[in-house]
Image (tube, rainbow, N blue to C red):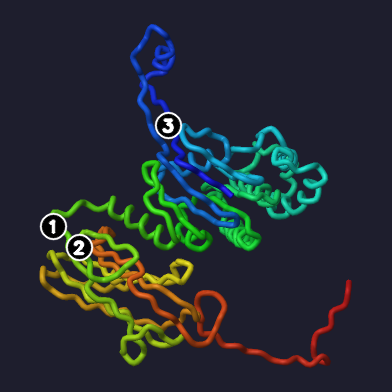
Amino acid sequence: MVTLHKVSKSYQLYRRPVDRILETLPFFPQRLHTEFWALRDISLEVRPGEFVAFIGPNGCGKSTLLQIVCGILPPTLGRVVVRGRVAALLELGAGFNPEFTGRENVYLNGEILGLNRLRIDRIFPGIAAFAEIGDFIDRPVKEYSSGMYVRLAFATAIHVDPNVLIVDEALAVGDAVFSNRCVRKFEELRQRGTTVLFVSHDLGLVKRLAHRAVFLLGGRVQAEGSPAEVVNRYVGFVLERQKEAGDEPRSAPALAASYRHGDLSSEVVAVRLLDGRGEEAAAVACGERATVRIETRIRRGVSGLIVGILIRNRLGIEVFGTNTQMEECDLGALEAGDMLLVDFCFDCLLTEQEYTLTVATQNADGTSQDWLDDVLGFRVIGRRAAGLLRLPARVAWQRIPSSEAPSRSAS
């Protein structure tokens, strides 16, 4: 279990290096530093076996918080309690001695975490197999590429059987094969009940793995809750920061959405899902023709308006999205007071489960006019299949009698 109670972290900033020395002199009463609070009043309790993701822009305090949990940095104020063995994979370069070989670093890290030599001997083959760095395991890690380093560091962290695993944005340098292997390992850790705190800018990964997400901004918690809701808040913040503030006052939204943002130059007033018969429905059959109908009121004249949809599954993973620009549909010039009706028609090849629909109207530069996250939920029913899509497939087969089958002889 990990508990943080009103944790704050302050740094003293000096304009010149000499000011640090002058401030220590007893006859120099003037304070020459300014205080920068990287974290402010962070209170959080992480239950055993819980996956918690921290998201936010660069400089918001995510890495500082993880370093405090690991014990690398002391908090300026507050209290941190961590129970159990902690394994950490922080920024690239931390934790390994560059002069030691990979094998020596694995044994050193294992001993630091309290494992005896015999235990490390037993787990080392699994570490080497997961890292897949071959003969480089006996070469100094200063000769490793960034990908080799991360593979070995991650393999070591997960194989020492930690009670708490802390992972910063260190996996970003891995290739696609290694990233998929790490995701599968994370899912295995979830099933085993390992507590994990991780920072990631991969919002799809956050939705897929985390039980809970925390959005940090300016060293404070801005939102905490289900990954889908917190990620939507973060995405809305990013888009809001990118757009210029509009002069026109906003009206209260009528449609329910988990999060809504935009300058409201246009306003989505209705969203409907239609089945193959053209009737409004809460469920569609796999393979059925489906239509998403979006009604929009134009509040300010606009040219180049983009209307789009995004479908997510119950884990928050984005499975399909498109918009009028991608479909090469020019909506032309629209005037204030116009109503716009846009239909997105497609064959529903999604597998049987629950989904949410996000819709948006956007300016040509990608900033939002009206973005509604998870405005509508629906279910796909029918034939089951593995994965996210049920693609049309044909099976061809033939039987070859044993008398006609080619024989193979050992050479």
Measured as percent of width and height from the top left, residue 19 is found at 39, 16
Mark 2 and mark 1 in contact? Answer it, CB < 8 Å.
yes
Disc 2: which residue: 264
Q: Nearer the viewer, mark 1 or mark 3?
A: 3
Disc 1: which residue: 248
Which amino acid does the dot numbered 2 rest on? Leu
Rendered view: 390 above or below 235: below
Q: Nearer the viewer, mark 2 or mark 3?
A: 3
Q: CA distance from mark 2 to mark 1?
A: 9 Å
User: Which disc is residue 10 wearing?
Assistant: 3
Q: CA distance from mark 1 to mark 3?
A: 40 Å
Q: Residue at x 75, y 41 (%)?
A: 107
Task: Pick whichever, 344 or 251, lies toward us.
Answer: 251
Estimate how packed mark 3 is, as few (under 14), some (14 to 19) or many (20 or more) residues with alpha carbons within 10 Å: some
Q: Secondary structure at mark 1?
A: loop
Q: Residue at x 49, y 53 (%)?
A: 53
Mark 1 and mark 3 in contact? Answer it, CB < 8 Å.
no
Q: CA distance from mark 2 to mark 3?
A: 39 Å
Rendered view: 156 above or below 265: above
Measured as percent of width and height from the top left, residue 14 is found at 38, 22
Q: Secondary structure at mark 3?
A: strand
Task: Pick whichever, 187 or 320, lies toward us.
Answer: 187
Which amino acid does the dot numbered 3 rest on? Ser
| Residue 230 visible in the shown view | yes
Q: Earlier in the sequence, mark 1 or mark 3?
A: 3
Measured as percent of width and height from the top left, residue 231 is found at 40, 58
Q: Earlier in the sequence, mark 2 or mark 1?
A: 1
Which amino acid does the dot numbered 1 rest on? Glu
| Residue 177 visible in the shown view | no
Estimate how packed mark 1 is, as few (under 14), some (14 to 19) or many (20 or more) residues with alpha carbons within 10 Å: few
Q: Secondary structure at mark 2?
A: loop
